[in-house]
Image (cartoon, rainbow, N blue to C red):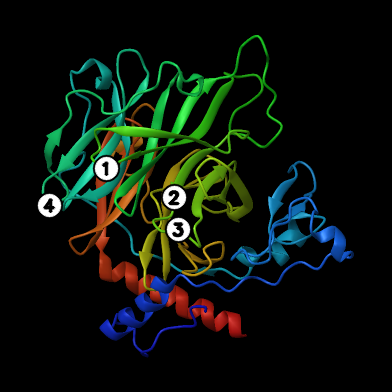
Amino acid sequence: MRATGFPGGDERIRTADLRVANAALSQLSYVPTPPVILPNPQESRNAPGTTSPSFPFGRKVRTVFANPVPPVLCWGLGNSREEADAMNPSAARVVTLSAPRLERHPENPILQPTTHWWECRWVFNPGAAVHRGRVHLLYRAQGEDWISRLGLAILEEDGVRVAYRSPLPVFEPDVNNPWERLGVEDPRITRIADQYYVCYTAASLYPALKPRTYRRPSPFTDAGVPWRTRIAIATTRDFRNFRRRGLAFAQWENKNGALFPVRFEGRYLLLHRIFPDIHLGSSKDLRHWHNYGPILRPRPGMWDSNRVGAGGPPLRTPYGWLLIYHGVDDNRVYRLGAALLDPLNPRRILGRSTDPILEPEEPYEREGLVPNVVFTCGAVFYRGRLMVYYGGADQVVAVASVPKEKVLAWARKVALRSQRDGQD
């Protein structure tokens, strides 16, 4: 089944609407996209880049884009990016609609560096989750050795003031893991069943004696420091004991990994960033991964023209998956925006915010290790508000929020308009 719209003619969020939509969403029943018909049916069984048509997202096929974009696994066939976009459901008409702006809390910043050696320089980019009724933040910290580790902060019932802060890091690089030699960064926390899955960036360098050439578009250059970044995954039940699960897409430069909070027909779905786009990947066991191509791309001439990346994990709403994402312009200013993904087929983007919902304005956002940055790894619905926890200028942690009903009203408008446009 597919989401086809919601009853009611006004813009208020009605209880009946929510019950109906939630019931539909909870079924997690998917309509497969029409399979690609290959010329020779015998070849289709083993054709490179194809999967069973019973997979809920249809078949993946190898698409060769025009230079300088390298071959990727993408939805649809085509000899150019434009042709692939035309056949990719996520590239269909996307609703653009102004989303409600976030309101900064007057007590910002809520976390700052301390005198502890491991977090005396910068604290920033926290992941967020609600555990036992309280917001837990796993935040990135750098100290005297410049290595990134993760600290834990548990907030008061208001979701702002700090009730507990760990005196030592709760997660740090494994000295025997070459992927983590320079740190563990930017955690994003997803709860699935009774476990919390933490996607983080494992940072290291390529060997200096073997110069690295970036064959794919990359924010790094061949002449600069040979950075190596990968998405790693760990699980925890108490935010103190962690179990590493391995890397996702170990073959690619990758960041900004965020898992969906439900499994789709037994598969984990992962948003991740292969520069400069947000991609969608899947896995049955968190070890073997398949990429299905970009679903959200930069928009030329806009505030997210240079690159985009997932913020926190997608949040379930009756009208689709709400994604807070960061966008970077050509002047390297980081802002936050919102996107809505189809509730039953999240590779399809229903809508995006026209303007940013948060941008650098305060001194703690404009001045710091990296100026002009607001960067989130965690957002939660908490006590009637959407709470977005973010790093300001890579030096402090802050929070901004908006009433939940405003977010749902925006999502409802996007869903209705997307449905109407699809019927034109």
**Type of the residue with mark 2:** Leu
Residue at x 64%, y 64% (from the top left corner): 91
- Mark 3 or mark 4: whose residue is earlier in sequence: 4
- 332 to 228, vertically: above or below: below
**Tag on residue 259?**
2
Considering every residue shown, the one lying at the far right of the view is: 40
Residue position marked by numbered label 3 in the rendering: 263
Question: Which of pointers 3 and 2 indicates the residue nearer the eye?
Answer: 3
Residue 42, horizontal then vertical, whole percent: 86, 62
Residue 404, horizontal then vertical, whole percent: 26, 66
Residue position marked by numbered label 1 in the rendering: 237
Instruction: Report whether 97 appears left or right of 112.
Output: right
Q: Spatial distance from mark 1 to mark 3, Cα to Cα?
A: 18 Å
Residue at x 17%, y 24% (from the top left corner): 167
Classed neighbour count for the residue bearing mark 2: other residues with Cα under 10 Å, few (<14), some (14–19), many (≥20): many
Residue position marked by numbered label 4 in the rendering: 158
**Type of the residue with mark 1:** Arg
Classed neighbour count for the residue bearing mark 1: other residues with Cα under 10 Å, few (<14), some (14–19), many (≥20): some
Mark 3 near mark 2, Cβ–Cβ under 8 Å?
no
Residue sitting nearer the eye, 167 or 414: 167
Question: Which of pointers 4 and 2 indicates the residue nearer the eye?
Answer: 2
Helix or strand or loop: what does disc 3 sit on?
loop
Helix or strand or loop: what does disc 2 sit on?
strand
**Type of the residue with mark 3:** Arg
